[in-house]
Amino acid sequence: MRSASYLLAAPLWLVLGGFLLVPMAAILVVSFFDYDSVRLIPDVVLTNYADVLLSQVTWQTYLNTLKYTAMVWVLTVAVGVPVALFLAFCVQSAALQSVLFLVCTVPFLTSNVIRMISWVPFLGREGLFNGALMGVGLIDRPLDVLLFSDFAVVLAFVHLYALFMVVPVFNTMVRIDRRLIEAAVDAGAGPWAVLREVILPLSKPGIAIGSVFIITLVMGDFTTVRLMGGGQRASVGLMISNQIALLQYPAACANAVVLLLLVLLMITALLRVVDIRREL
Amino acid sequence: MVQGVELVAVSKRYGGATAVDDITLHIPRGVYCCLLGPSGCGKTTTLRMIAGHEAVSDGDVLVDGRNVTNTPPAGRGTAMMFQSYALFPHLSCLDNVAFGLKMRGIGRAERHERARRGLEMVQMQAYADRMPAQLSGGQQQRVALARALLTEPRVLLLDEPLSALDPFLRGRMRAELKRLQRDLGLTFVHVTHSQEEAMALADLVVVMDGGRIQQAAAPREVFDRPAVAFVARFIGGHNVLGGPGGQVAVRADRCRLSTVPDAACPGVRGTVSLVEYQGASVRVALTTEHGEDAVAILPDAVFFADPVGVGQPAWIGWSAADAHALSA
């Protein structure tokens, strides 16, 4: 019996071990290596961590990444919660609910990169949006902040990841017992009070799970920042990717370890505030 | 002005299906009313229409003379206790009870003070800081009761309040509901499918079937003189038998059992199909010559003075005065 359950768990362990634990161990080991411009030198040095933690540039990059994460989190909550609320409470028929839910996932039929690039002709100096604004005479010079800016980066993030907030929040909301809402209405709660006192508190686990997705996705991203920031904006992911391009693997690894610890810390803090076990 | 709850020609339709069909009912103020019927008879829908959680398709709902047909639930002077209690899982008992006061904008200190008194009323003051998940079913129910009462309703609506409890607790809560109703002098409308519960609690029993009221009367009236065959069968303890002048109902405990028919009394012959010892009484069922079932409930002393066994021929009779004609 006992050996059978170990046997059943073995494939998962093999996958997690082979594809998660071993690579992470490798990253950890390499982060202590020394390097020069052409080769890795196996060693145990702390210079990589010193470079990460003592440089003004990395601090700024980390802060910038945290700023993106905070902005994207606020915006995805602002977009995701109303969408989930609409799907869960305003759409009465279960069939229509599934259809609309599928509609939400349609953008995922194309790749991230394509969805991002599609913003370029829209937001660029000669793009549709600037053209339209000039056409109706609202502005006489094209707006530069639209593309290759923080605005563009955050916009693309929200576009790409809002669904990661919608899905778990929707999932929690559909499981809220409708009688709780009736009980609140019976006790004199209006629509806003029902939202504030019943639905939002009970949706917290879903929002927390969505937040875990958003935090890990945005903290680790480099393509969105590179494409939408036009090379002008920095993020930790982008910094790591650049270090890899320069073959500075130990530096990249040290950076990755620091980033991993930071993200784990954020998620731990989040899960201490909200209990999500009921949702898993 | 008519006091209490009035339903005037109320109907509820879902698409083509009619859940409640043109019912008119007056529940006087201060009365304990039970809506009794099998599942799907429209009793819960009726309750929810009184509460305002279900829109009325046709007709009017009045509470103490005021037409509340289009009034939101909180403005009707009703409070509902839900079947599964519907306590807010993220709030402590105290905050659950204080919820209605919070919605009315009453400050934290005052509403907690009043909620504490509400919990005392149902002997739950020791559990004020517990979360609902940490309470047993009976305790959750008391909290739900306190929450409903703290909105100071004129009418308390209870949707199958006892069905989730074990039999022992059910008996205790039943007594407690009755005591609270008497002490507070409120109108209670209680939905149940248990005739025993309705008999024990109600001043007014409303038996429903197929979205219509089959009979609305005091429990003794319903039990002594069921209006139609459905009521006689549903409340139990009756024989419903076809006769020359239409169907009649006879209370099973008014029947006599004998091996020799008494020519002076109406009765039916048959074969004993069941003998059930119930302590103080014995239930004997016959299958008659016409294939109908007839039941006699006899005091144990009477039965054991002259017992019969399954398979024996026997006769169940009654005095003509005990037979009660049913309207079709």
Image: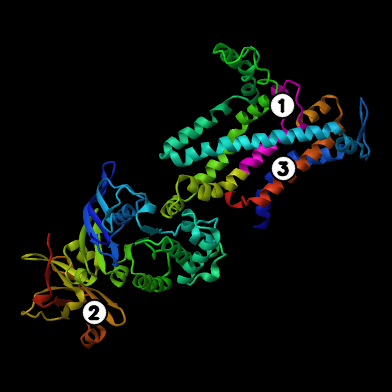
Q: In the picture provided, is A78 more to the left or to the right than B99? A: right
| Type of the residue with mark 3 | Leu
Q: Chain of mark 3?
A: A
Residue at point 34%, 49% (across, down): B71
Among numbered discs 3 and 1, the one appearing first in the sequence: 3
| Type of the residue with mark 1 | Val
| Type of the residue with mark 2 | Gly
SS class, disc 3: helix
Q: In the picture provided, is B200 more to the left or to the right than A27? A: left
Q: Give neighbour class at mark 3: few <14, some 14-19, many 20+ (Cα, 10 Å).
A: few
Q: Is residue A230 magenta?
A: yes
Q: Quadrant of residue B157?
A: bottom left
Q: What span is colored magenta in the figure?
A: A209-236
- Spatial CA span between label 1 and label 2: 90 Å
Q: Circle 1 sits on which residue?
A: A225
Q: Are marks 1 and 2 on the same chain?
A: no
Q: Chain of mark 2?
A: B
As drawn, B117 above or below A150: below
Residue at point 39%, 63% (across, down): B161
Measuring from the top left, give residue B312's x and y in whole percent.
19, 77
Residue A16 tag number: 3
Name the main secondary structure of what is drawn in magenta. Answer: helix
Asked if one can make out residue B294 in the rendered structure from this viewpoint, the answer is: no
- Spatial CA span between label 3 and label 1: 29 Å
Q: Circle 2 sits on which residue?
A: B309
SS class, disc 2: loop
